[in-house]
Amino acid sequence: MLHRFCWSRVLFDARTRILAWYVILMATSALLSTVAVRKILLVRMEERVRASIVLEIEEFRRLQQGRNPRTGELFGSNSKALFDVYLSRNLTEENEFFLTLLDGQLYRSSPEALPPLLQPQSEYVQRWGQTTQTEEGTLQTPFGKVLYLAEPVASTRFDSTSTPAVFVIVRFLTSQEQDVVEAVNVLVNVSLAVLGIASVLAWIAAGRILAPLRSLTETARSISDSDLSQRIAVQGNDDIAEMGATFNEMLERLQTAFVNQRNFVNDVSHELRTPITIIRGHLELLDDDPLERRTTIDLVTDELDRMSRFVEDLLLLAKAEQPNFLNLETVDIQALTDELFSKATALADRQWRLDNKGIGRMVADRQRVTQMMMNLTQNATQHTQPGDVIALGSAVVGKEVHFWVRDTGEGIDLDQQKRIFERFVRLNRADRSSSGTGLGLSIVSAIARAHGGRIELVSAPGRGSTFTIVLPFDPP
């Protein structure tokens, strides 16, 4: 069973499949190339042979127009003399035959030994003997492919009293075809050798290319539910390297999510344990005194309300990660700033100021932007005193819109600024609201991120704080 499993793994893994497809493509290309080369070589060989035959016929025609070197007279109708002179002057190529026909019969040939196909009584010789026009063609015979060109002597074409004379050139292509076959065989052998060597190199290259995949598999196997620290070594900038980097980024997100989830569970259990303990303690001590009963009910109701707000804040943070969290619309920045300032002034007795109003229109969730600003404003009222200044404003900066809340309160220490937007983080101040859940600034940050924006903080102890919400004109 183990042996079969190992073989199936080797046969069906990515490296083997890549090599198989490579071999199939290379073999198909080699096969098509071989067929095409064979066809091209045969066509060109046949063209060269045909061109050679045409040149020999042209030489025969020139000889007809000349004089007999033996007598000095024109050949005229003396076809025998014409044939004798041409055959004495010209030698045939390999597998080539010159036939001279007089009155339908074979007069002379070169060479004299003729194959069965060109014997005087063969049907081809009999047909060529009756030719009155130049005839060129190809024959498929048991002896292979044959090219021929039959040329009647010019003086016999139009003179019916002259003895019909025909000069025929016949070329057997067997030897030339064998040369082509040998060349193709050499090409096939070379292609097979190249394919074998290339396959070995492709196997090695595929192993090197897929090495990050094996590393990814090993890393994935080494990850447990409590250890997400393993990472893949990424080299280069190709697709495999990009996949490794993406996998590492995924592990980073998973590790962050795991840590956040663990901290979240710890924080939630801590936040809920206190009101539950308070409620249980007072209920256990509850007696029949109406006044004490009323006091206990008010306390329990207050704790339940605090738990309810806590759960609602948690649900809001969870929804902020969903793609349909925002209800986007076109918002007039100036009108929204006026609305925000009007709502903020009713929160507490402070010196309220409106710094600036941005001019323009943006795409945003009006209610969520209002929620962010009201959270920041409420937070400012909790950390300032009557007579302190709280200012609001908005401005258009490039392709971004800035909304800010500025106060002249105590300010925030630098070490606390780095973690103030984390969940359940509260500033250690005596005058802070006891009903806070530590999620307000986390909610502001989550809503800003949902818009594709961010929140910035500038603060110093004794100099107040400025929270700035930076949003794009068009959120993603």
Image (spheres, rainbow, N blue to C red):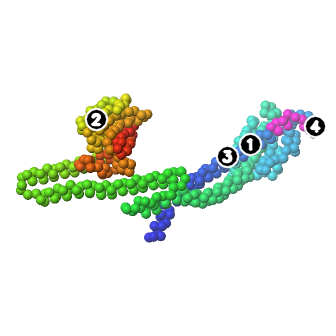
Amino acid type at image mark 3: Ile
The reply to whether residue 126 is visible in this rendering is: no
Seen at 50% across and 62% down, the residue is 11
- Front of the two marks 4 and 1: 1
- Front of the two marks 2 and 3: 2
Q: Is residue 230 left or right of residue 238?
A: left
Seen at 29% across and 49% down, the residue is 429
Secondary structure beneath disc 2?
strand
Magenta-drawn segment: 58-71
Residue beneath disc 2:
351
Horizontal and vertical percent for residue 113? 81, 52
Residue beneath disc 4:
71
Amino acid type at image mark 1: Arg
Seen at 74% across and 44% down, the residue is 48
Secondary structure beneath disc 1?
helix
Camera-side residue: 403 or 87?
403
Say which label, 4 or 1, has the lower sequence index: 1
